[in-house]
Amino acid sequence: MNKILQNEISAVILSGGQGLRMNGKDKGLVEFRGLPLIAHVVSVVKPKVCHIFVSANRSFDEYSLYGEVIADDLEGFQGPLAGISKALKTCSTDYLLVLPCDSPLVDSLLVDELINKMQLSDADICVAHDGSIMHATFALMKSNLVKSLEQFLDKGGRKMALWYRQQTLERVDVSDRLAVLTNLNKLEELDF
């Protein structure tokens, strides 16, 4: 087993969306149970990694409270892979943990499972899976994938699952606790 230490992992919290289903509000900064959505994710991630990046395309000052803000290299809102690409180019660790800003029920067990799966395999990417589909925004990947992702984006690729499947991939089954994958996409979902 290849033990992965905290100082070998950076995290990127994907916060660069347009918030179209949140009436244009910056999703990561919308409050849920008294805290911005991103604060819930940061509280889980902070003890597991040595550095946190926040991939954002606006609200830079607000997001800087939660980590080092990075903006996409690609113009416009090109999707989560653009944020991951920037994080891979910027991070100095061997691994990058990827999580969305709008999943406040994510827990440290999921992070541990992604790390453990990476330690026990030869995978390039370990990703959460609900028993039917992969949830690509919950993943741990090797940072040496930077060139592969850059080439994929340069060819117009934007689908996370498509790029993931081009790598050595391992899935982490969370079908017994799907709540950790909950994405809050609309203002009315914040009340549960």
Image (tube, rainbow, N blue to C red):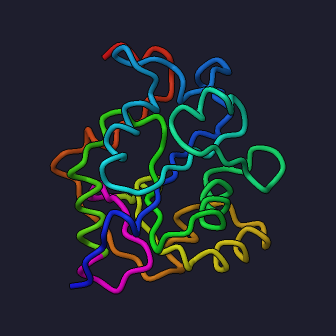
> Is 177 above or below relative to 186?
below
**Residue 179 percent coordinates (x, y):** 26, 38
How far across and how far down the image is residue 169, in percent? 40, 77
Residue reaching furthest to the right: 75
Whether residue 114 sits left or right of residue 137 in the image: it is: left
Quadrant in the rendering for residue 159: bottom right
Residue 77 magenta-drawn? no
Q: Judge from the rendering whether residue 23 lies leftward or rightward of residue 45; answer left or right.
A: right
Q: Residue at x 37, y 58 (%)?
A: 133
> In the image, is residue 80 above or below residue 3?
above
Query: Which residue appears at 50% of the width and 75% of the height?
Result: 165
Judge from the rendering whether residue 170 lies leftward or rightward of residue 68; answer left or right.
left
Which residue is located at x 72 percent, y 39 percent?
A: 57
- Residue in front for this viewpoint, 191 or 57: 57
Name the spot of residue 22 as percent of width and height, x first: 59, 21
Give the magenta part as a residue range.
119-132
Does residue 75 lie above or below 169 as drawn? above
Q: Is residue 121 magenta?
A: yes
Q: x, y percentage for residue 65? A: 54, 31
Name the residue: 30% across, 17% down: 192
